[in-house]
Image (cartoon, helix red, strand yellow):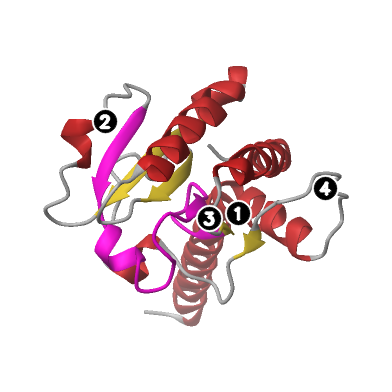
Amino acid sequence: MDKSQVQMNKESTDANLAAFKQRRSRGRLVLIGLILIFALPAIIAKTVLEQNWYTSGVTNTGELVEPRVTLQDFGLTAPMEGEGWLVGYIAPTECDSLCEQQLHYLNQSYLALGKNKERVTAVVFVSEGDSLPGAFDKPDLSFLSGGDQLSTKFAPASIVIIDPLGQLVMEYKSVSEPSQLVGQSKGMIHDLRKLLKLSRVG
């Protein structure tokens, strides 16, 4: 094989290698782009809340969940996770009159979202052996297991907002008086509308 053929083979190999590297780099960029498309809006929404870049104008709004925690950290996976936002009520072991009123307000809050309710699922996290799902008939509420696990960090009768990536974003602590339920509900609706406006995910 003469020098000209060797040179041609080398140039052909270099060209193929360069093309391969270019395709691989393009594939990585596409993957990064897809990740950003799905993850960035939810991250931006949470950052806006953390930095207080909007004025709530409503009392009894929720508290940001810190440090970062996801449903997966509790060993949980919601069937509708990834399809939209979740508003989850962590049901106490015994659902008394106040608990029943909270579930009523949770259901009403979900309905009050209007057209945005298609982007949200209202769920009730119950503990093992809880008879609540059979005793409380609300077709707009989904009952899921996980109350035991979530109660290790959040007090029973608390409400949490969960983004489409499974991250718990905001917490609304349990109340002790029925008169506090209206304010809590209004604050939650306000926060949730802001989150939905800021995020195109879900």
Which disc is residue 106 wearing? none
Residue ID for mark 1 = 36
- Dot 1: element: helix
Q: Residue 162 versus residue 110: which sits nearer the camera?
A: 110
Alpha carbon separation for disc pair 1 and 3: 41 Å
Q: Position of residue 128 (x, y in %)?
A: 15, 57
Type of amino acid under label 2? Phe
Q: Residue 180 versus residue 115: which sits nearer the camera?
A: 180
Residue at image position (55%, 63%) is 25
User: Left or right: where does residue 77 sit relative to residue 201?
Assistant: left
Alpha carbon separation for disc pair 2 and 3: 21 Å
Alpha carbon separation for disc pair 4 and 2: 33 Å
Upstream in sequence: badge 4 or badge 2: 4
Residue ID for mark 3 = 176
How many C-alpha atoms fall within 10 Å of the one at disc 4: few (<14), some, or many (≥20)? some
Q: Is residue 172 above or below residue 134?
A: below
Q: Is residue 54 above or below residue 185?
A: below
Q: Is residue 99 above or below residue 66?
A: above
How many C-alpha atoms fall within 10 Å of the one at disc 2: few (<14), some, or many (≥20)? few
**Magenta stretch in the rendered image:** 141-169
**Which circle, 1 or 3, is nearer the viewer?**
3
The quarter of the image holding the N terminus is bottom left
Q: Is residue 6 magenta?
A: no
- Dot 2: element: loop
How many C-alpha atoms fall within 10 Å of the one at disc 3: few (<14), some, or many (≥20)? few
Upstream in sequence: badge 4 or badge 3: 4
Q: Position of residue 175 (x, y in %)?
A: 54, 54
**Which circle, 1 or 2, is nearer the viewer?**
2
Alpha carbon separation for disc pair 4 and 3: 23 Å
